[in-house]
Amino acid sequence: MSRETDDLAAVAEPPEDEDLEDLALGEDYALNPEFVSDVADALDRGDADRLRELIAALHPADVADLMGFLSADAREELIPHLDPETLGWILSELDTEIREEVLEHVPSATLAKAIGEMESDDAADVVDDLEADKRAQVLAAMPETERAAIETTLAYQDETAGRLMQREVVAAPQFWTVGQAIDHFRKDGEELPELFFDIYVVDPAYKPVGAVPVSHLLRSGRQILLAQIMEPVTEITVDLDQEEVAYIFDKYRLISAPVVDTAGRLVGQITVDDIVGVIQEEGEEDILALAGVSDAGRDAGVWDIVRSRLPWLVLNLATEAVAVQAINAFQGEIAKLVTLAILMPIVASVGGTAGTQALAVAVRALASRELTAANSVRIVGREMIVGLMNGSVVGLVMSVATYVLFHDLRLSLTIALALLVNLFVAAAAGILAPLTLERLGRDPAVSSSVFVTFVTDLMGFLSFLGLASLILL
């Protein structure tokens, strides 16, 4: 089944499709508020015909987006107006939080039919979101073959290739010719995956020995053996982490890849559309982790958001309590020269910004494998040199500004040197913190920012007040 708009024609044949599509989406492909309001009004009026007409004009991904803009009650009212085929595609596109809520309101029999319309990887994700009782009901209502496929997929660890793969593959023996393959695929077309790019050539033990791209197959003569035109394949093992899979796809520019079990037998395939989702998901996780927060979806509760962010704020409060002890140690100096209290936050703040810059670059480089043990010394050295150069320039600019404001050369020299020291330390902390955490087997994106903030604040206060006590007092 295709995901194009005409797949939804089974719901209804809406008049003036083009006008409805124009009403539904803006130039940025986001849903227009007016269209969302029309859907909500149709639900309020109980106008089933108008509702089906509006929904039929949308791609399933846009219907999934629409669900996020509707209230929970409105979503519940909308569900009965979706046929199982359409519902299946929509469920695969929904945000996890909204999907879990929607699944509660779909009858088990309807849900079994909807899941049967989905690709095996998407079907397993939906079943995994079900409560235990409802999962048993849904699986019991499904054909034995589909049920067995989903249960096998769910047996693999989450976020691995086994969970990411779709079990539907196109395979052929080495001794087949191009003509035999084409005739066979045409005869059994309904059994083919909806989307595939390669025919995997397998040996008698069903182990992949090569692959023939569909485009290559169509350009070859009917009498040519598949073994003569097949290309080497990059195999993915079922237990490989999805981040590793995404890295392999990016590195080798893959469109699809076979997935093999521990014995090397072909059990599924991963296609580039699955990898796009993984890259987006992992990127979002890293960005949120870098800030010490979790995803706050459109329906996230206030308490859930508070609970995810508060521990990091408390930890940051504890580290800052240690950092301010540097200020406490120089109370006498600050009392003698109040100007220090005015300029002191600048040094810490600029250092924090410099540390965050280095940290963001380091986390991205680690995630993309651009920063490894092979080049870590060079990259660390480069960041330290950058810190010195930035510190020199920023220190010079700030020293001039300080002299203009306070007409004190020694104070200007103090803040210039403090900025030089702190930006150098900030660059070192920003690159070394994530490297150290990764070496320790921890996620470098999760806690690096708290550590870097602590270091830059502590060194900012120490360097500025320490130098002030030596130069000014």
Image (cartoon, grey):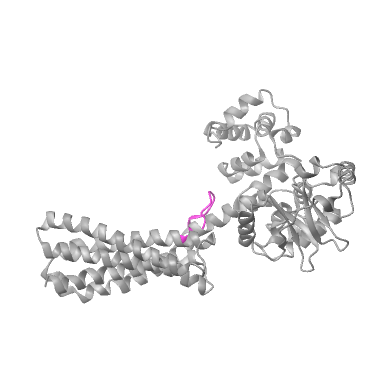
Up/down of 389 relative to 321, above or below: above
Is 380 displayed left or right of 166 in the figure? left
Residue 111 picture location, percent across and down: 75, 49
Between residue 349 and residue 376, name the one nearer to us.
376
Residue lying at 30% horizontally and 64% vertically, measured from the top left:
388
**Magenta stretch: dominant secondary structure:** loop
Number of numbered discs visible in the structure rendering: 0
Residue 224 picture location, percent across and down: 86, 46
- Please say whether residue 470 is visible from this viewpoint: yes
Q: Does 177 lie within the magenta span?
A: no
Rendered-image quadrant of the C terminus: bottom left
Is 277 displayed left or right of 175 in the figure? left
- Please say whether residue 316 is visible from this viewpoint: no
Between residue 283 and residue 112, name the one nearer to us.
283
Q: Does 291 lie within the magenta span?
A: yes
Find the magenta span and give its range.
288-303
Between residue 226 and residue 305, name the one nearer to us.
226
- Give the image quarter of residue 441: bottom right
Between residue 172 and residue 122, name the one nearer to us.
172
Residue 35 picture location, percent across and down: 57, 32
Residue lying at 77% horizontally and 44% vertically, measured from the top left:
216
- Give the image quarter of residue 325: bottom left
Is 371 displayed left or right of 417 in the figure? right
Residue 195 picture location, percent across and down: 74, 45
- Give the image quarter of residue 405: bottom left
Residue lying at 89% horizontally and 51% vertically, measured from the top left:
176
Rendered-image quadrant of the N terminus: top right
